[in-house]
Amino acid sequence: MSIPAAALNRLIRPQSIAVFGGKEAARVVEQCGKAGYRGDIWPVHPTRETVHGHRCYRSVADLPSAPDAAFVGVNRSLSVEIIRDLSQRGAGGAICYASGFAEAVSELPDGLALQTELVAAAGDMPMLGPNCYGFINMLDDALLWPDQHGMVHVDRGVAILTQSSNIALNISMQARGLPIAYLMTAGNQAQTGLSALAAAAIEDERVTAVGLHIESFDDLDALQHLATRARALRKPVVALKVGRSVGAQRAALSHTASLAGNDRVSSALLKRLGIGRVFSLPQMLETLKLLHVCGPLSDNTVSAMSCSGGEASLMADAGVGKAIEFRDLAPEQLLALRETLGSMVTLSNPLDYHTFVWGNRARQAQAFSTIMRGDYAINLVVLDFPRGDRCDATDWTTTVDAVIDAKRMTNAATGIVSSLGETMPETVADRLVTEGVVPFCGIDEALAAIGIAHSIHAAWADPAPPPLLSSRPAGSELICLYEERAKPTLAAYGVKIPYGMVANSAEQAIAIAERLGYPVALKGLGIAHKSDVGAVRLNIRSASEVYAAATAMAVADRFLVEVMAPKPVAEFLVGALRDPVVGPVLTLGAGGVLVDLIDDSAILLLPTNPAEIRRAIDGLKVSQLIAGYRGAPAGDKNALVQLVASVADYVADNATRLEELDLNPVLVLPEGEGVIAVDAFIRTRS
């Protein structure tokens, strides 16, 4: 079942907490005490009288009232009983700490059945887990957390959610100046998953952004709801998606299946939903920091300043391949900077301002503010602090003061970047966040964060996407429709195919070829990868060639004879397959032999529209051929867009049965002459 986000409010913002168990439960009480939790704490234990000064109760029934939140830290069998009692008492929610459920079926055969019993026991009461460490709420100082952590009280900040307790522990120890409001784990996600939990946290007005560490997508509807609320509330979400699903183990019967890996589909899903994708924990933390301070960025232009040519070079090189732009300085900036920095400084972006103004707060602020008035999305100053235990950081503090002065003068988005994470002191980072300056730890992470922050803005600028095509597989037996059946099926949806006929012998193939007129193409039927086994012959121009080609195809006893298609501008691939998470998806890319030679494909989730299709095509390398490469004629892109739209219609109409579809190659003819699908394969359920 899916628990609505509103139902989680009592659990994650509790006024009363009950704890069940021994050592772990006592640690929860201890952590609440250290944090200064102001609500009621009710330990439940069969023999103890108090836990850290709090009176013990003997059972759920013995509690003063139904608790808002409960930490259940007992063995797995007893956990089911207590969860049931809490649900019947009307508790706001519970953490099931015990393991030995669905995650341990190889060791405990009854694990899955016991997890099903646990979910049934919870009923409508929200439950996190099993195998869940709990959560930390540092806005209200409420901790259902049986361990140490490194967090402090905040008045506003980001929410970070993960399935992994150890990842959560590690994140809690960050010293990067990122204010973390919520740190939550979801365990097995037997009832309530990360997406629903995140949707509850994002509704808190004190939460500024959300980070997800995703091992596997839990509930697609809940994830779409989270993205919708994020857009409406203007609170960005980023995700670190790791791991491989069963989709990656799919047998590749077609090129489509080999191109559309699980990771590509994950990227397409997150992009569609306007969720920024990060690729490491440091990148996630730095992106969240930027989003907390500045929010999504309206463009991707960056200015960079440092007092070292080496640092400026590092910054310039780090920008290669990232979705950012170091736009040139404007003429009026050059004149003002020359007056401030002198004649010996080379004026460029990134800027090495040398040490001529080092230690001079006023002149540094003047130079920085000149750059910041250049209407960049964000302005960066590279600054690595010396060790505080051995060195004097006075001049570095002066530079920080100058950056803050310039920020106040211009109100421009600003960040200070340490090239090494350990050279950004936490005290400095905390001060910068308070002043509205982003304290970035790492140049690569900073530039990646800027690109991601802009991608979220760009996604929100477009109309919200419609809900994904929802389709559960229907039917059982999988059947393959090879070319002679797949092509007419798709032609009914408007896909243009060559005219042809089926022959049951070499002699019949000759007769058909004579009727169609030469040149013709001859193909062996019932084979998925015909070219790999010599079952395709093109440009056949005589009866003797037809006979020789047919008798040479030992792998086939039936043939398709077709009118030879014209020479194309480009060869394209259009495919579809069922992803285990999102259902049917389209794959577009370079076709023909290029499929195996270059990595050039894109994923489109359904439903789609002609504008999305066109953008996907334009993002491919093969689009250069279609546009008319080096004086060659341009291809009929409009016809290609229409063909893809026709395939999308077929997939939508057959979404419950289709497993795989492959059109390769689709010949893109010169502009105005259309496109032709010369090979097709469909795998579907009967």
Image: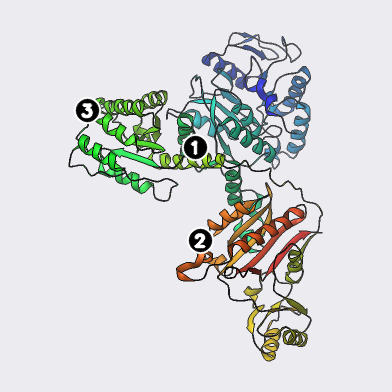
Work out how far the residue at label 2 is from the one at label 3, CA to CA, in angstroms.
Answer: 50 Å
Secondary structure beneath label 1 = helix
Secondary structure beneath label 2 = loop
Identify the image quadrant of residue 338: top left
Scheme by which the image is coloured: rainbow
Q: What residue did someone put label 1 on? A: 284
Please report whichever mark, 2 or 1, sits nearer to the chain's N-terminal start: 1
Please report the residue visible at 69 percent of the width from the left and 61 percent of the height from the top: 661
Secondary structure beneath label 3 = loop
Per the rendering, the mark at residue 621 is: 2
Residue that lies at the very extreme toward the bottom in this rendered image:
544
Please report whichever mark, 3 or 1, sits nearer to the chain's N-terminal start: 1
Q: What residue did someone put label 3 on? A: 360
- Label 3–label 1 contact, CB within 8 A: no
Spot occupied by residue 562 in the image (x, y as percentages of width and height): 70, 78
415 relative position to 33: left or right: left
> How many residues crowd mark 1 within 10 Å: few (<14), some (14–19), many (20+)?
many
> How many residues crowd mark 2 within 10 Å: few (<14), some (14–19), many (20+)?
some
Identified by mark 2, the residue type is Lys
Identified by mark 3, the residue type is Asn
Spot occupied by residue 239 in the image (x, y as percentages of width and height): 55, 39
Q: The C terminus lies in which quarter of the figure?
A: bottom right
Spot occupied by residue 147 in the image (x, y as percentages of width and height): 55, 24
Identified by mark 1, the residue type is Met
Spot occupied by residue 540 in the image (x, y as percentages of width and height): 65, 85
Task: Name the foreground residue: 206 vs 493.
Answer: 493
